């Protein structure tokens, strides 16, 4: 469904003061260079309508701390790899771990990239990092195996 189609349901739930729990706060995901809305977008809209949202997941540092605990890894042995400045990189910053920002993901269009593996202009990456207050340790055009 489109976000606009859910608006009446969100308004009704907000009016009834039904809390929303968001386990995946990503705003968008990318598939074949097309962005698709994710639960975080729905939750942000719900908050704007006056609904209560309990955010769980990135960029909260608890997710990174839990992953490091499960792997028995220290901050100095860890790195977050992701394509979302707001979620992946900002979360790594909050957890105090290094990060690798993949520019060919959800921010590719914003960065002016047109083909897979194309390198982003560093000044554009820096401007976007400032916009999202999320600062990667490393910048890579893609992440492949």
Image: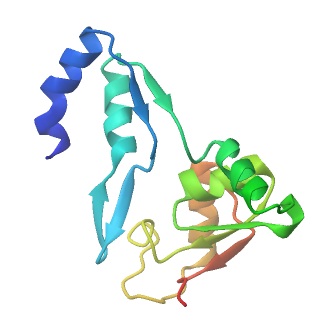
For residue 135, above or below residue 138:
above
Residue furthest toward the top?
A: 16
Would you say 40 lies left or right of 117 here? left
Residues 83 and 63: in front is 63
Residue 144 at x, y percent in the picture:
53, 88
Residue 76, above or below 59: below
Count of number-bearing discs: 0
Q: Residue at x 55, y 52 (%)?
A: 87
Q: Residue at x 11, y 37 (%)?
A: 5
Say left or right for 29 vs 97: left
The chosen color scheme is: rainbow
Relative vertical location of residue 129 with respect to residue 137 in this rendering, above or below:
above
Residue 50: % across, % down: 35, 16
Residue drawn at point x = 37 percent, y = 61 percent: 29
- Dividing the picture into quadrants, the one containing residue 139 is bottom right
Quarter of the image that includes the C terminus: bottom right
Q: Quadrant of residue 46?
A: top left
Q: Is residue 9 above or below residue 139?
A: above
The one nearer the camera, 72 or 37, is 72
Judge from the rendering whether residue 64 lies leftward or rightward of residue 140; answer left or right.
Answer: right
The location of residue 37, given as percent across then percent down, is 29, 52
Residue found 55% across the figure and 51% down from its top: 86
Please state the horizontal and vertical placement of residue 143, each as a whole percent of the image. 55, 83
């Amino acid at each position: 469904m489109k976000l606009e189609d859910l608006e009446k349901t969100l308004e009704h739930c907000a009016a009834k003061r039904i809390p929303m729990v968001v386990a995946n706060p990503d705003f968008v995901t990318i598939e074949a260079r097309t962005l698709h809305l994710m639960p975080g977008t729905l939750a942000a809209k719900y908050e704007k309508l006056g609904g209560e949202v309990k955010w769980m997941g990135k960029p909260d540092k608890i997710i990174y701390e839990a992953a490091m605990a499960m792997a028995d890894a220290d901050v100095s042995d860890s790195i977050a790899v992701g394509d979302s400045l707001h979620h992946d990189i900002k979360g790594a910053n909050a957890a105090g771990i290094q990060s690798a920002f993949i520019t060919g993901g959800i921010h590719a269009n914003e960065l002016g990239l047109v083909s897979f593996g194309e390198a982003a202009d560093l000044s554009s990456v820096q401007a976007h990092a400032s916009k999202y207050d999320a600062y990667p340790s490393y910048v890579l055009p893609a992440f492949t195996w």
